[in-house]
Amino acid sequence: MRHYFGTDGVRGVANDLLTPDFALRLGRAIAQQLLETVPHHPPRVLIGRDPRRSGAMLEAALTSGLCALGVQVTSAGVVPTPAIAYLTREGHYDLGIVISASHNPAHDNGIKLIGGDGYKFPDEYEAHIEARLLGAPEPFPYPPPERIGRWHYDPRESEQYLLFLLHLMRELTGEREPLRGVHIVVDCANGAASAYAPALLHELGAKVSTFHAEPDGDNINRDCGSTHLTTLQRAVLETNADLGVAYDGDADRALFCDEQGDPVDGDAIMTLWALTRHHQQTLNPPVVVATEMSNLGMQRRLEAEGIQLHRTKVGDRYVAEAMRYNGALIGGEQSGHIIFRERATTGDGLITTLEVLNLYLHYQKPFSEIAHPFEPYPQKLITIPVRDKHAWQTHPDIQAQIRAAEQLLGTRGRLNVRASGTENAIRIMAEAETLELVEAALTPVAEAVRRALG
């Protein structure tokens, strides 16, 4: 049983679970693990964060724990999560750390670990760190002062990431300003994208209408960004833009809307990209990796074109692992967290934006005509707070209702029940050929969960 690490690092309320004391102790545990596993000393760590209020506090405490045991720490400041993945790999750091709670509200925060290869740490590595954290003696035996690690802030790290993105788009298109004449609305969620996305797109020649790019530490994700897409939809219609893009707090995901204000999710983007590459005979192997939440309509469309959809558990780390295993070029989640394996090791909202804009330029059509490549099945997802989020797996009444729902759906739909990775809740999703069938399958299962565990 994990005590602290979930599907995406450690996440919780600032000054509740994520106190400076906890961050300090976690920094020490990470340092111990690095000192025993990396072949050289001192280990080198790169840290970045999103702009929420508690970020600087937690970075200072985490850095203190790392430096106290002899680790060298470089801070990149406020940067998107995928920037740390890229810079850790390119800068030959032993570890990257991101302090962010992604799409969560400002009072939450999180600590994510990224390996020197740019990929998120596997579960077993985090388990070793947890064991060190739980077993640390008090008072803790610190080394002598001459072994304390050094800390410094390097603004060149974030500049290098922006230059990488500019070069990528210019290489894809062969033009210095490929977006000249394209009007894009950008919703930065008052998060880490605020200093990057507008500057990037403007430098590439686009006309950019920017919204929610003034982070104050408390307004991240508040009624904006990828979790509140209606803001973007309204802005696109009001400005007569060609398309719009919205990020989450740490900019590792992106969702879009077309010029008519209709939303375009991660499933649609992955399908469009895969179909385009397949028709160009450059999708090798012909596989897309998605989670168990991706729409059945997507699966049917891909399979009709001879493309396999490989499903994983929810969580970008599981998508990345499956992509590495089967060599897939693209994988991701309906929420807009998409990995382009030729470009990056993790989901990157800004790379996703560039890949989508490259498709838009390729087709030379209104975005609405290309951005909806399949007819989605009706789908409904509900979240039920519970006392024990694992008990559903063995509860006889819940299991009986799940079996009945699966029998009802047959080949016309599917049901997914899972424990939340970030809260004490169960998520139930049903999709089917009709909304009536969705409700018929979903409702009895939800009622059984509420009766037994609510």
Image (tube, rainbow, N blue to C red):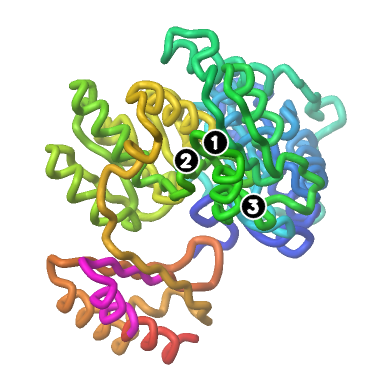
The disc label shown at residue 259, or none: 2
- Per the model, the C-alpha gap separating discs 1 and 3 is 18 Å
Image position, residue 306 (x, y; %): 12, 37
| Foreground pick, 15 / 439 | 439
Whichever of callouts 2 and 3 sits on the residue coming sooner in the sequence is 3
- Per the model, the C-alpha gap separating discs 2 and 1 is 6 Å
Q: Secondary structure at mark 2?
A: loop
> In percent of the image, x 79 and y 60: which residue is there?
15
Determine whether 403 is above or below 69 in the image: below
Q: Is residue 370 left or right of residue 178?
A: left
Disc 2 to disc 1: CB gap under 8 Å: yes
> In percent of the image, x 38 and y 71: which residue is there?
428
Residue type, numbered disc 3: Cys
**Neighbour tally class for label 2: few under 14, some 14-19, many 20 plus, Cα within 10 Å:** many
- Of discs 2 and 3, which sits in the foreground? 2
Determine whether 218 is above or below 182 in the image: below
The region drawn magenta spans 428-443
Image position, residue 317 (x, y; %): 43, 44
| Foreground pick, 189 / 148 | 189
Count of labels shown?
A: 3
Residue type, numbered disc 1: Ala
Disc 1 to disc 3: CB gap under 8 Å: no
Whether residue 432 appears in magenta in the rendering, the answer is: yes
Whichever of callouts 1 and 3 sits on the residue coming sooner in the sequence is 3
Residue type, numbered disc 2: Glu
Whichever of callouts 2 and 1 sits on the residue coming sooner in the sequence is 1
Which residue matches tag 1? 241
User: Furthest-right residue in view?
Assistant: 145
Which residue matches tag 3? 224
- Of discs 1 and 3, which sits in the foreground? 1
Res 73 seen here: no
Q: Is residue 25 left or right of residue 315?
A: right
